[in-house]
Image (cartoon, rainbow, N blue to C red):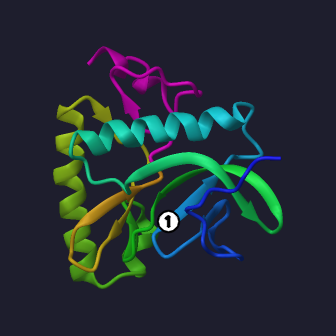
Amino acid sequence: MSKVTSLQTYDEPIRVNKRIYKISNEYIVKLISSKSLLAKEDIFYEIKIARISHSMGIPVAEPIICDYVKIYGKIQMGFIMEYVAGIEGSNEEYNKSKHPDTDLQLSNQLYEVERTKAFNLGIFIVEPQWILTNDKKIKFIDVAKWQYKGLEYPFKRISENFKDYTEI
């Protein structure tokens, strides 16, 4: 039987999203998708792209490790990353009604700056999601669909327009 990571301090992790749980004051875990045919590969790809992005100065939730956690009494593999407090955002229309205009405007401006920086470094941000932190910075979360010029993308492309991105 596998051991549960020492990073998990909550006996009962707090569900944040469909497969994301807060496992301590400092960390969250994204569990392996039960729908993906490449179940384990999705989190291993995501930690790779998160580490690359983080090392290049792109503000992503700090990637920690893929390890075992205990959720509802079941030991499961997941991608453990830094917990980021703040207001969740994305470039989706629905966020316009959820946040004050100043926060939305600031987070969208910060997103555009970071998107351009990432693109210039060879990182293509797909379906961006971020947290606007209390100190008015953004940190990207859910980088699973991002693409990097030197990293093989193991999943079906979102659009045929992205297929040549690895040639940047």
Is residue 103 on the magenta stretch?
no
Residue 144, above or below 92: above
* Of 17 and 66, the residue lying toward us: 66
* Amino acid type for the residue under numbered disc 1: Tyr
Q: Position of residue 11 (x, y in %)?
A: 70, 76
Q: Position of residue 72 (x, y in %)?
A: 80, 69
Going by the picture, which residue comes out furthest to the top?
Answer: 167
Q: Position of residue 108 (x, y in %)?
A: 25, 63
Q: Which residues are magenta?
A: 143-168
Q: Residue at x 71, y 37 (%)?
A: 39
Mark 1 is surrounded, within 10 Å at the Cα level, by few (under 14), some (14 to 19) or many (20 or more) other residues, namely: many
- Magenta region, mostly helix, strand or loop? loop
Q: Dividing the picture into quarters, in which one does residue 52 lie? A: top left
Q: Which residue, given by chain and number where applicable, does mark 1 sit on?
A: 27
Question: Would you say residue 74 is visible in this rendering?
Answer: yes
Q: Residue at x 19, y 61 (%)?
A: 110
Question: Would you say residue 145 is visible in this rendering?
Answer: no
* Of 130 and 7, the residue lying toward us: 7
Residue 147, above or below 74: above
Task: Give left or right: position of 165 versus 13.
Answer: left
Secondary structure at badge 1 equals: strand
Q: Residue at x 31, y 41 (%)?
A: 53
Quadrant (top left/top right/bottom left/bottom right) for the C terminus:
top left
Q: How many marks?
A: 1
